[in-house]
Amino acid sequence: MEDRVEATITVNGTRLTRRIEPRMHLIDFLREELGLTGSHVSCEHGVCGACTVRVDGEIRRGCLTLAVQADGRTVDTVEGLSDSGELAVLQQAFHERNALQCGYCTPGMLLTAQALIKEHPEATREEIREFMSGNLCRCTGYQAIIDAIETVLRTPRTEGVR
Amino acid sequence: MKPSAFAYARPRALEEAFALLDKHGENAKLLAGGQSLLASLNMRLAAPEILVDIGAIPGLDGIAVRGQTLVIGARTTHRAIERSEAVAKHAPLLAQAAPHIAHVAIRNAGTLGGSLAMADPAAEWPACCVALQATIVVTSKKGERRVAATDFFKDLYTTALGAGELITAVEIPCVEKGERHAFLELVRRRGDYAIVGLAARARLKGKTLSGVQLVYLGVGVTPVQAKGAMAALEGKTADDAAIRAAQDAIARDLEPNADIYTSAEAKRHLARVLVARAVAALVG
Ligand SMILES: Cc1cc2nc3c(=O)[nH]c(=O)nc-3n(C[C@H](O)[C@H](O)[C@H](O)COP(=O)(O)OP(=O)(O)OC[C@H]3O[C@@H](n4cnc5c(N)ncnc54)[C@H](O)[C@@H]3O)c2cc1C
Ligand code: FES
Ligand code: FES
């Protein structure tokens, strides 16, 4: 019944124009229309963080953003940020510290942690916990995730990794 | 869950938004950051026919100082307020409160105007605006009107906003010399809505308090000014006796409702704890 709305969005560096149903969430657009299933979807009301993506460089809830609201913006997902290498150091640390089990929360954890690393590289362990408090994990008990992020923050930066 | 179907409009000017609100009446909903609205649509607590996205209307965001007034556009995000040097300087209460609102990914999208229009009794901005004696600028096709924050929050999720009206800005008197702010909040986990929170403000001369404002969140259907406790501290030296008097008054000021996690008595106790901490923070 309701008309689709045209939107032009740059997803992981590729500009595309689509006619989108207004009620479609950005996360469902990415997963179902574009096949980018790296970002997950779980609670669909903003509490779990599994759907975290970047819009114009800043992390957002993909389930609390309409795809049509991304018209004219850039969207980056875990796929794009893995391919560019931006997340490589963090991914390695998650691997080494056993910071994932089922992996459902991991893409959201990575994007949120990367925002922390960029904005607040001096964060204490307590501050890491506070920053990550909007991302739920049902498996790890969080310690390993905080360990992995802390490892990255405490490791001297090497040229070009970020 | 997924929301039911709706139409979507993205007006480029206020007049266009007013026309859409006029045409669709109760079936239209304004969309700002979407951090409350989309959650409630996803849960199918509401099913508007059309969302009017205010994201492309010029002039609704930004932070400016005009004379002795800090003016914050309604569409300014929680995150922009958190990061603003002008806010830290002229309304430190807001800078202190911002990190308590939800999580970074939500603060990047959620807006000041959306939070005030939503009027969640446990939200930070409504209590801060009351404590700061802010003015809420409301615009409709008939023009602009200004509502004192103290008159804006009417009941649970209910404000002074009428049909066809939009919040366009908030005006906050800049902090004066000797004025102190303190924002405190108790939660189980950073980012949750407050169990109990307190926005406090006073002028300090030596250790004497005046112009005291104590506005609680999470204890009623709207932000609650603890008038007895404010009076107990007014003109007093901030010592243990004054704090005890304020704590005693709190018991009479507040009639908190229990929620699923916290009893009314526990909330009252936490409110007493917070007033003591707030006085310490104001004079500290
Ligand atoms: C998991 C989670 C945790 C949260 N925790 C907190 C918290 O701890 N503290 C807190 O304060 N908030 C919290 N929020 C809510 C968040 O702060 C919202 O951003 C805010 O309440 C609404 O702002 P918005 O811009 O997203 O508004 P929207 O969701 O777009 O709109 C909310 C309502 O306001 C109306 N509206 C929007 N803008 C205007 C305007 N300019 N004029 C008139 N009406 C308007 C809309 O029509 C709608 O009815 C949380 C949200 C989530 C999902
Ligand atoms: S699916 Fe978006 S926050 Fe849970
Ligand atoms: S690893 Fe399973 S939810 Fe986090």
Image: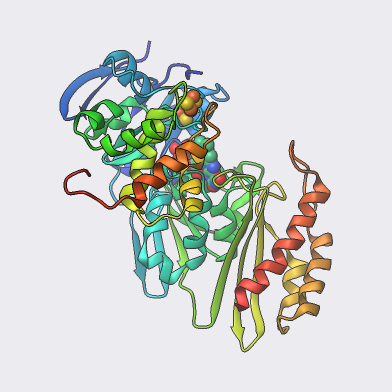
Q: Nearer the viewer, residue A141 or B153?
A: A141
Q: Position of residue B195 (x, y in %)?
A: 68, 48
Q: Residue at x 46, y 21 (%)?
A: A102
Task: Please state which of residues B135 and B281 is positioned toward the viewer in this rendering.
Answer: B281
The quarter holding residue A151 reads top left
Tell me how many marks there are.
0
Residue under the image location 79 percent in, 56 percent down: B269
Q: Residue furthest front?
A: A96
Q: Could you say which quadrant of the image residue B51 lies in?
A: top left
Q: Indicate the quadrant containing the C terminus of chain B: top left, top right, bottom left or bottom right.
A: bottom right
Query: Which x, y percent locates residue A42?
Result: 48, 22
Asked whether, in this view, residue B172 is left or right of residue A29, the answer is right
Q: Residue at x 81, y 79 (%)?
A: B241
Q: Residue at x 53, y 52 (%)?
A: B100
Q: Is residue A44 visible?
A: no
Residue B65 is at least partly visible in this image: yes
Instruction: Give above or below for B39 relative to B271.
Output: above
Above or below, B207 against A76 in this view is below
Percent from the top left, x then y, of residue A161?
21, 43
- Whether residue A82 sits left or right of residue B95 in the image: it is left
Give the image's coloring scheme. Answer: rainbow
**Which residue is more in the foreground, B76 or B102?**
B102
Question: Is residue B226 left or right of B13 when viewed as pictured?
Answer: right
Location of residue A32 in the rendering, given as x and y in whole percent from the top left corner: 33, 13
Above-or-below relation of B30 to B221: above
